[in-house]
Each structure stands twice: as C-alpha cells, then as structure tokens.
Image (cartoon, rainbow, N blue to C red):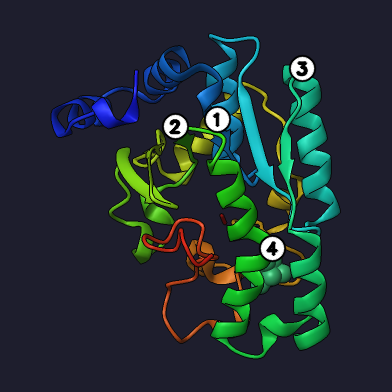
Amino acid sequence: MRVEDIKEDALENLRSMPAGALIKWAFENFKERAAVGTSFQLTGTVIIDMASRHFKKFRVFTIDTLRLHPETYDAIRGVEKKYGITVERFTPEEDRLRDMVERFGEYLFFTDRAKQEYCCLVRKVEPNLRALKTLDVWITGLRRDQSGFRKTVPRAEIVEKDGRRILKLSPLADWDMERVWRYIRENDLPYNALFDRGYDSIGCIICSTPLVKGEPPRAGRWRWFNGEDDKKECGIHVKGSGSGNGG
Ligand code: SF4
C-alpha cells in the first residue's frame, strides 16, 4: 500500500477504527515503513503495548534532545526490556547544536518564544524530520484534551513533511487521561516515574515541570510562558513546520 493511494473515504474508515485495530492495520500494511514516535508519555507506552499484542518486532523511535530527565531514559530502558525492542534514538545534529549554544547559550529558551522555538527546532523538530524520512506512517500519542491547540487532532490524517505525504495516526486522540491511566494500571505497564511526582507532560529538563493542582495538562511546559496562550508546542506537531524546522 502507498500513502498516495489513501483517499478521504479510506481516512474516514481509519478514523472509525478502535485504537488497537488501527495500530495493527498500520504495521500490517506498512511494516517497517510504519513507526511509533514517542517521547515516552503515557500514551506512547499504551500504543507500544497494543502493537506488541500483534507483532514481536515493530519500529519505535524517540527524539533524544540530550536534555531529557534521567527518569525518561529509565522509562525508555524499561519499555525496551519489557517488550524486547530497541527504541531508535534520533539526536540533534552536532554542528547545529554547537552553533546554537555558542550563539545564544545553553538556556536560550528563557529569552523569548522565538528562542524557545529555535531550541526546539534544533533539538527536536529537525531530528524528528530525519526520523520521518524513514517512514510513511507516523503513529503518535496525541490526545485532544491535552490543550486547546490539540482539541481537533484527527485520528488519521495526511500531513506533508519535506514535500512528502505521510499518514499520521493518533489512535488515542479521543482518550482522556483517566482511560489512559486505567489501561496502564490494568496491564501493569512501565511508565516514567515523574508521573508519580506531579508531572503530566514530560519533555526536557527545566522546560517541563510538575503541575500545581487544578492547572491544565500542559501548564508545566515552558512554565514561564503561562499567561500568553496555550499554544505550547515544540513544533513537531505544528502544521507547516516541516520544512524550516515532538513534544
Ligand atoms: S523543550 Fe526546552 S530544552 Fe528541550 S528543545 Fe525545547 S526549548 Fe530546548
């Protein structure tokens, strides 16, 4: 099957499939040209668990910004051990990273939104684009209730990245956090220990912090920008960010 052959009626069909069936369909039809892209939030692990029920080998990749929490690296190792898989790691391009740090410093993301987006571009978005070049189907753990910006996330859509069409699936788009936790607990899945310490959305050190009771899910991300708006994105999932430029 080719992504070019998937028309709107087929997309509609995919959007109506239960999560497990959608993941199975993706790996059955696209094999190693399909992959789960995850930053090891809870949904990523749920998707990996669902895939493991049908396949012994399947692709999982993550963007290692080189600034992840130690607990996130532990979570990656925990998943690799449980499922007998090797998570593919895509890291920032060395020269570009060095140039950024020399010009703006290690903590440029505090300066303003543009510098935060530039840091995310170098550390996350560009490595993610490199990952996307290796696949046709990108399976993500996005959920609609994570923020206003994500509330229209479709379960299946065609996106353009670097002039190529990619089928992007978000099988858990309509799940809420309670359902995600229920699946994690009922199936005794490994998860990032930071979730037990108040974190709800986990990215890089400093840029992701625990929530205070009552805060919306992504309030802990780039906390110093709270009050501007809730478009708190690194660019990985922003439409049109494919050419210039996770989590
Ligand atoms: S989350 Fe922070 S440290 Fe990580 S890439 Fe984005 S701005 Fe840089």
Locate residue 192, reporting x and y percent: 73, 44
For image coordinates 56% across by 21% down, the residue present is 32
Which label lies toward us, 3 or 1?
1
Residues at marks 1 and 4 touching, judged by CB atoms closer than 8 Å:
no
Task: Write the residue at 39% across / 25% down.
Answer: 19
Image quadrant for the N terminus?
A: top left
**In-image side of 105 versus 150 (left or right):** right
Q: CA distance from mark 2 to mark 1?
A: 6 Å
Are circles 2 and 1 on residues that touch, CB within 8 Å? yes
Query: Could you classify mark 4 by the number of other residues whose Cα lies within 10 Å: few (under 14), some (14-19), or many (20 or more)?
Result: many
Between marks 3 and 4 in the image, the one whose residue lies nearer the viewer: 4
**Tag 3: amino acid:** Gly
Q: Is residue 66 above or below residue 63?
A: below
Residue identified by numbered label 4: 123
Give coordinates of residue 34: x percent, y percent: 50, 27
The residue nearer to you, when weighing 91 against 43, is: 91
Tell me how far mark 3 sits from mark 1, CA to CA.
Answer: 16 Å
Report the disc number at residue 35: 1
The reply to whether callout 2 and callout 3 are in contact (CB within 8 Å) is: no
Residue bearing mark 3? 84
Considering only order in the chain, which callout, 3 or 2, is on the residue closer to the N terminus?
3
- Residue 209, image x, y percentages: 69, 68
Q: Residues within 10 Å of mark 3 (few under 14, many from 20)?
A: few
Mark 3 CB lies closer than 8 A to ligand 1:
no
Per the image, the residue denoted by label 2 is: 137
Circle 1 Cα neighbour tier, 10 Å, few/some/many (<14 / 14–19 / ≥20): many
